[in-house]
Image (tube, rainbow, N blue to C red):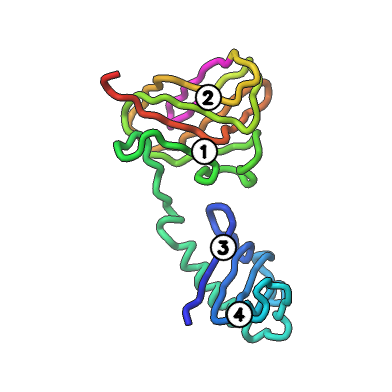
Amino acid sequence: DRSLFFYWTRRYPELYQNMALQKESYKLVGHTDYNAQIADFRLFNIQEDPFEENNLVEQKKNIAESRKKELDLKYHELIKSPNLIDPPRIQIGSVYENPVFLNRNDADGERGIWDQEEIYGKWNVAIEEGNYDFKFRFIKPVPKGGKMYLETGSRINQMQNDVDNEIFIEMANVSLSKMKCDLIPFYKVGNKKIFPFWVEIQKLNEHQ
């Protein structure tokens, strides 16, 4: 029977953390360290125990070891995948998708990026030349008196925000060259750099 390999960490797989391999009726689950011994894993018979409550790793050590060997093979195949080594860039300004929404699922940056405000994040993008409207949405309303920054490669656009308790900030008619770069937006107020929850990017019609 075919085996099924799963991992459910954000973006990149972490060795033995939030990953599993299922073959026939047995499922090996890892919620442990990179150098864990087999006893640190969990093994379930999912036909007899569909809610995964009875850990059989000690009683069925041979099966657990066999599943772990296959899990190791699948993991090392996965981390050599071209899409993980060199992920495709998000296309900005394409005729096929306009506007584009960038959300934190697709962002690179610090761990814990999903729900924190003051955190470094970026998106790997390929931008078509043109003029764009940007809308930045924050987790919570931001105070006035700060500056909104948009970094695209070596080009930095910034603007003052004079509206208090605003959950959206917009930058209109931003001119960008064709480039492959990291797109890095943040709102700087005082000593804080606040990363948007999502970004909407609309390429403007050339005749506008």
User: Where residue 28 sits in the image (x, y, percent)?
Assistant: 62, 74
**Where's the C terminus, which quadrant?**
top left
Quick check: marks 2 and 4 in contact, CB under 8 Å? no
Q: Which mark is residue 7?
A: 3
Name the element at disc 2: strand
Distance from the alpha carbon under mark 1 to that under mark 3: 23 Å
The residue mark sitting in front, 1 or 3, is 3
Quick check: marks 1 and 3 in contact, CB under 8 Å? no
Under mark 2, the amino acid is Tyr
Q: Earlier in the sequence, mark 2 or mark 3?
A: 3
Magenta span: 149-161
Q: Earlier in the sequence, mark 1 or mark 4?
A: 4
Q: Residues within 10 Å of mark 4 (few under 14, many from 20)?
A: many
Relative depth, front residue between 1 and 46: 46
- Residue, disc 4: 26
Q: Is residue 144 magenta?
A: no
User: Where residue 38 sits in the image (x, y, percent)?
Assistant: 68, 77
Left or right of residue 101, residue 98 in this image: left
The residue mark sitting in front, 3 or 4, is 4
Q: Which mark is residue 122?
A: 1
Under mark 3, the amino acid is Tyr
Distance from the alpha carbon under mark 2 to that under mark 4: 51 Å
Quick check: marks 3 and 4 in contact, CB under 8 Å? no
- Residue, disc 2: 149
